[in-house]
């Protein structure tokens, strides 16, 4: 059996690290939580990590660490990914990979030069239902696709994601969830797009919506917001059928299993895709990629392509309200 991948976590007090990724590392038989680091001070659960640091660079200098998970604010992804690469560490960086496509490109080049793996920590594709959705969208079960729509909203209180200096905004935080299945449905980047947004007092988009025209008969729309009640929904309509997912399509739990399909005849079908732990699947996959046992399911190039689309949407967006 191969030696376990020894993980370090930069920003170990973050909610996503504590509640999801660190437990997934501990539970994965091919991984080991070797070290954690936090600059926030105070005690926090280390989940049995062998070493803990109050300095990120000290963790990167630890020769007992093979790879790092980076859940830091978006504005810090570039700096600490480059530093990790220079220290010879593989990098799983929380989504979005960077604040913009240019930064993500710099990160990818640094990791390529250092000969280390870089992957965006976008966990949704590692759920069986997400795999089922991709199959339905790309295998022709709905006929010729004509419409698709993604919605992801929730009310966000005081948080660094409202801070423009930390890479805040609804599009940057939630865009990967909304746009990824739309791009899968279109099987290409859109030919045309337009967008609008509301801007909060801090100067970032609180709500961002857009329309995409793929030039092949498929039109799509999305909305992501920090200002509305919690809602997640995905739908796609084709000439032979339509699907909806109302049960957390973007952040599925182990209990979220079904895709609801309406056939052209009107017959309703619920497709049971099975459940799974998205974070566990992501950690296991990353470890396999580092060991050369798997090809990356999501490459830096794909993350850069999505950020390029988001950059363009943000530049073109009409401001419909300012607080």
Image (cartoon, helix red, strand yellow):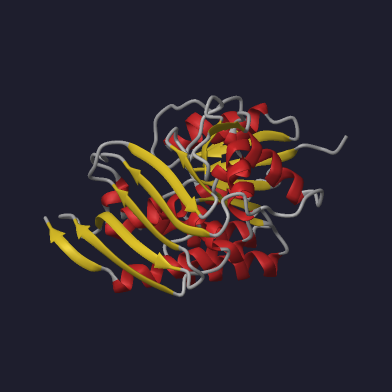
User: Is residue 310 among what the camera can see?
Assistant: yes
Q: Is residue 34 left or right of residue 152?
A: right
6 with respect to 317 (left or right): right
The quarter of the rendered structure image containing the C terminus is bottom left
Instruction: Please state if 63 lies on the left or on the right of 39 as rendered.
Output: right
Q: Is residue 22 left or right of residue 168?
A: right
* Residue 184 position by quadrant: bottom right
State which quadrant residue 280 falls in: top right
- In percent of the image, x 25 and y 58: which residue is there? 204
Which residue of the protein is positioned furthest toward the front in this rendering? 265
Q: Residue 91, image x and y in percent?
A: 62, 53
Q: How many numbered marks are there?
A: 0
Can residue 35 be seen at all in this image of the molecule? no
Residue 102 is situated, as x and y percent measured from the top left of the image, at 48, 72
Q: Quadrant of residue 279?
A: top right
Residue under the image location 62 percent in, 70 percent down: 109
Q: Tell me if residue 273 comes above or below residue 173 in the rendering.
A: above
Give the residue drawn at x 18%, y 55%.
200
Q: Residue at x 30, y 73 (%)?
A: 316
Farthest-out residue, right: 1
Q: Quadrant of the N terminus?
A: top right
- Indicate the position of residue 104 as horizontal and vertical percent values: 52, 66
Q: How far across and how far down the image is residue 296, in percent?
A: 70, 54
> In this orientation, which residue lies closer to the viewer: 55 or 132?
132
């Amino acid at each position: 059996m191969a030696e376990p991948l020894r993980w370090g976590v930069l920003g170990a007090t973050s909610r996503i690290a504590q509640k999801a990724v660190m437990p997934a590392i501990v539970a994965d038989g091919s991984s080991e939580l070797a070290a954690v680091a936090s600059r926030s001070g105070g005690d926090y659960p280390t989940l049995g990590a062998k070493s803990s640091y109050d300095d990120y660079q000290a963790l990167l200098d630890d020769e007992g660490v093979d790879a790092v998970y980076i859940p830091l604010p978006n504005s810090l992804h570039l700096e600490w990914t480059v530093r990790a690469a220079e220290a010879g560490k593989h990098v799983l960086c929380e989504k979005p990979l960077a604040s913009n496509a240019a930064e993500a490109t710099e990160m990818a080049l640094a990791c390529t030069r250092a000969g280390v793996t870089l992957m965006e920590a976008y966990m949704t594709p590692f759920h069986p239902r997400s795999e089922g959705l991709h199959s339905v969208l790309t295998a022709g079960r709905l006929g010729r696709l004509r419409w698709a729509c993604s919605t992801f909203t929730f009310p966000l209180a005081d948080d660094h994601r409202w801070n423009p200096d930390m890479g805040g905004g609804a599009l940057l935080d939630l865009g990967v969830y909304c746009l990824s299945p739309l791009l899968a449905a279109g099987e290409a980047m859109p030919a045309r797009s337009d967008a609008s947004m509301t801007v909060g007092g801090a100067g970032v988009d609180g709500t961002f919506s857009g329309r995409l025209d793929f030039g092949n008969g498929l039109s799509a729309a999305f909305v992501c917001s920090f200002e509305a009640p919690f809602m997640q929904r995905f739908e796609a309509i084709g000439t032979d059928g339509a699907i909806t997912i109302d049960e957390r399509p973007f952040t599925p739990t182990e209990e979220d299993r079904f895709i609801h399909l309406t056939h052209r005849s009107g017959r309703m079908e619920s497709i049971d895709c099975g459940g799974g732990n998205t974070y566990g699947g992501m950690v296991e996959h990353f470890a396999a990629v580092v060991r050369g046992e798997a090809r990356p399911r999501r490459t830096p190039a794909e993350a850069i392509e999505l950020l390029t689309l988001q950059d363009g949407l943000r530049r073109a967006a009409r401001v419909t309200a300012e607080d």
